Image (cartoon, rainbow, N blue to C red):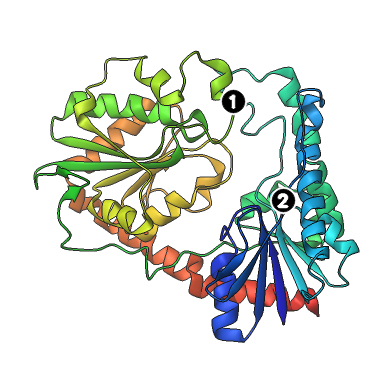
Amino acid sequence: MHVLFVHKNFPAQFGHIGRHLIDHHDFQCSFVCELESGHFDGIERIQYKIDGGATRDTHYCSRTFENATWHAHAVYEAMKARPDVVPDLVVGHSGFGSTLFLADLYDCPIVNYFEYYYHSKGSDLDFRPEFPTRELDRLRSRTRNAMIHLDLQTCRVAYAPTNWQAGLLPQEYESKIEAIFDGIDRTIWNRRSGIPRKIGDREISPETRIVTYVSRGFESMRGFDVFMKVAKKICDARDDVLFVCVGSDRVCYGGDLNRIEEKSYREHVLKQDDYDLSRFLFTGRVSPLELVDILSLSDLHLYLTVPFVLSWSMMNALSCGCTVLASNTEPVQEMIRHGENGLLAEFFDVEGFAGQALEVLEDPEKFRHLGEAGAAMIERDYSLEVCLPRMLDLYKRACG
């Protein structure tokens, strides 16, 4: 059986699935993306190149669809130029390199992966009242779903990584939508013992409490400003805490840069108060194995998100046995049960966050059972060993 994966990036959510299918089920896998062609772990990577996209003259509300159409057409042209590739199944991310036009190139089923369906109310757009939503952004939330609707109509089956994300999609497509998580590789994401207390060039004394925060970008969507307020209160209460912040000084989601004068949201937040930056270690991006070491040293991991796509970083922290204190928002509620496998605090409740954090930091070992329960949950419900068979079953049913 030959599976063609479609995503603008590689390996994205599909690389580990492709390797599993090749290694254990004798599948052939190809992957069309924007990166240079080649062969990687038995997967042929085929490059597509876009020749255009939305411009300043394109209506603001239709730019997402305009760009998605250019990607979909580029994917179509790249595969049309490869008549030797004849897939039995197409699997693609709706939104990042659309599979839409492949329905006119191949006579095979399409499975689409849906991460998010936009809503103007009760969503990431209006969750933070201190950041009023621009009228055009509210209107755009409808048109941003245009390609998603077309993919829902065209695909044979659909899936989302969590029940909450699946539930955002239109009810009329409910019968073809399932929730299957991407899968956590437990051979990588597990707590390591006996590692040196050193991050980069910084030696960390055994007496120092380590609080970790991980995000692709430092931004309001992931509560970076709230995290810093919480950290300030912890710093004021204890002088033995180091905050290790992993991620890039950029904005990946939302419109933070439209609301501030500074070049980055981190710079903006740091100007809002008198932070002792000697208590913070900003590592930049790190490799997965480096992140495992950092999480293994963590006494407490803080995670915040508005109602939006759940971050892999929270699941990785759970898998590494961290005591996780997270925002009590919908994506998180599906994973963390307060007092059982982690702790929850209301997103805007800085005092509540800080109070629970200080309780953990007073005696981290007292809360270690929460991290152990979190790791057990990942092993039981969200590990690759559990998710890959579910994914394979979905593929087989799509082809049946």
Q: Quarter of the image for the C terminus: give it.
A: bottom right
Q: Residue at x 50, y 38 (%)?
A: 305
Specify whether 350 is left or right of 57.
Answer: left
393, above or below 35, in the image: below
Count up the numbered dots.
2
Which residue is the site of mark 2? 49
Q: Determine the residue located farthest toward the right in the rendered image.
A: 104
Which residue is the site of mark 1? 255
Q: Residue at x 79, y 44 (%)?
A: 70
58, above or below 318, in the image: above
Contact between marks 1 and 2 (CB within 8 A): the answer is no
Q: Residue at x 19, y 28 (%)?
A: 278
Q: Position of residue 280 (x, y in %)?
A: 25, 32
Residue nearest the viewer, comparing 353 with 199: 199
Give SS at disc 2: loop
Give SS at disc 1: loop
Q: Position of residue 37 (x, y in %)?
A: 63, 63
Tell me how far mark 1 sits from mark 2, CA to CA: 27 Å
Q: Residue at x 31, y 61 (%)?
A: 372
Q: Position of residue 42 (x, y in %)?
A: 56, 76
